[in-house]
Amino acid sequence: MVLPATAAPPQQSISTSRQFIVYGTDVPVRGAICDLAERTKRELLSFLGQRDTWATPIVITPRYPQANLPELPTLNVYLGQTGFGLKLQLDLVIERAVNPPEIRRELLRALLLEMMYRRDPQLSPGATYVSPPGWLLEGIPSEPSQ
């Protein structure tokens, strides 16, 4: 008797606030991304004088460069509508050219999108979403390193 093969569930790490779900096989990379995401969120909330009242988790999928997919964007924030509400996803390709400030910028973009649309999660599919402008992302200071 042959049993059907089942795929192993994808490996994931969940950040301390539980807002960031990072998928991938490399545990140290997942941990570093969770740490950077939480630090970025803490800096943003401190800058805005806001409390942490997130409603939509942010899925982060780090990948290594693939020879068969050279056109993959290095960093991409995707906001879409599912049958259950908003879906926020940050795809990033881990390579030498990507640095933490670039990843932080896209994390800020995802966090601001979540804040902007958290009160209206049932926008119609195909609706156009407005992304935070670059000047806003650049104007949010980071905490001094300790």
Image (cartoon, helix red, strand yellow):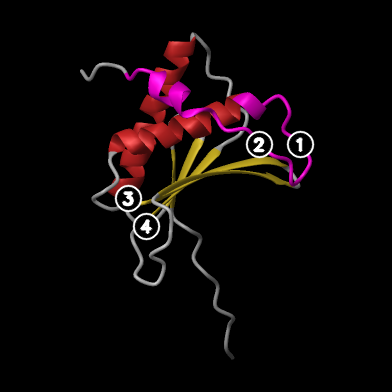
Residues at marks 1 and 4, CA–CA distance in whole angstroms = 33 Å
Quick one: label 1 or label 4, which is nearer the N terminus?
4
Q: Which residue is mark 3?
A: 27
* Nearest to viewer (mark 1 / mark 4): 1
Q: Is residue 30 above or below residue 140?
A: below
Name the residue: 62% across, 32% down: 130
Left or right? Give the position of 129 relative to 101.
right
Q: Is residue 91 above or below residue 3?
A: above
Quick one: label 1 or label 2, which is nearer the N terminus?
1
Q: Which residues are magenta?
A: 116-142
Quick one: label 4 or label 2, which is nearer the N terminus?
4
2 and 3 marks in contact (CB < 8 Å)? no
Q: Which residue is mark 1?
A: 123
Disc 3 secondary structure class: helix
> Quick one: quadrant of the N terminus?
bottom right
1 and 2 marks in contact (CB < 8 Å)? yes
Disc 1 secondary structure class: loop
Q: Which residue is mark 4?
A: 25
3 and 1 marks in contact (CB < 8 Å)? no
4 and 2 marks in contact (CB < 8 Å)? no
Count the marks: 4
Confirm whether the magenta stretch covers residue 130. yes
Residue type, label 3: Val
Disc 2 secondary structure class: loop
